[in-house]
Image (cartoon, rainbow, N blue to C red):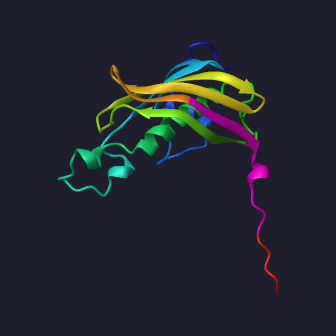
Amino acid sequence: MLTSHTALSAAAIRRLLPHRYPILLVDRVLELEPGRRLVSVKAVTCNEPCYARLGPDAGDEELAYPATLLVESWIQSAGVLGGSADVAVQPGDDRVMLAGALNGVEFHRRVYPGDLVRHEVELSRAIGETLLFEGSSSVGDEAVVTFDRCVVAYRPAAQLRVPPVTRAP
């Protein structure tokens, strides 16, 4: 049972998210108020798959952590928070979390290997199985990215499967 201000380990995060290496981008949840707010961290290291092909002379531009992965990490944090809400996907449930829209996303600074990114996520509204989040990411005292709104919807997996194509003999 998740209680107010619960911290979650990597194992607990893996139980709430379907993501696995190399795309599980939430390392630890520091604070969780179920259905309200969450603080998580992502440690960016030189061992990230996005750096695998870089040579020893890679410059700052090549070493900047991809913005798409930064956004994915924040949305996964929102997924953990959503997993603590009443519409959450429970063990054995076949619902899938879909990121529907992002509004007012503003990037403030680049992230580099060695940075510890702190994600802060708030659930601002829940409408049935659709959740609206807002928040930010920072490194130390510096804002990295802010999110005015992120819309996430939970849908049954069966509704998302494409029926197999049958070919005429």
Residue 28 position within the rendered picture, expressed as x and y whole percent measured from the top left: 47, 28
Residue 119 in view here? no
Q: Is residue 60 above or below residue 86?
A: below
Q: Is residue 69 above or below residue 118?
A: below
Total labels: the figure holds 0
Query: Who's the residue at 54% across and 31% down the image?
Result: 77
Residue 136 position within the rendered picture, expressed as x and y whole percent measured from the top left: 47, 26
Residue 149 position within the rendered picture, expressed as x and y whole percent measured from the top left: 58, 30
- The image quarter containing residue 45 is top left
Q: Quick check: 60 left or right of 96?
A: left
Image quadrant for the N terminus? Answer: top right
Query: Who's the residue at 82% across and 87% down the image?
Result: 169
Q: Is residue 38 above or below residue 92?
A: above
Nearest the camera: 25 or 131? 131
Nearest the camera: 2 or 127? 127
Q: Quick check: 53 left or right of 35?
A: left
- Residue found farthest to the front: 104
Query: Who's the residue at 32% across and 32% down the image?
Result: 115
The stretch of residues the image draws in magenta is 149-164
- Residue found farthest to the left: 57
Residue 112 position within the rendered picture, expressed as x and y whole percent measured from the top left: 30, 38
- The image quarter containing residue 2 is top right
| Residue 96 colored in magenta in the image | no
- Residue found farthest to the top: 4
| Residue 152 colored in magenta in the image | yes
Nearest the camera: 25 or 120? 120
- Residue found farthest to the bottom: 169
Residue 138 in view here? yes
Nearest the camera: 4 or 154? 154
Query: Who's the residue at 56% across and 34% down the image?
Result: 103
- The image quarter containing residue 141 is top left
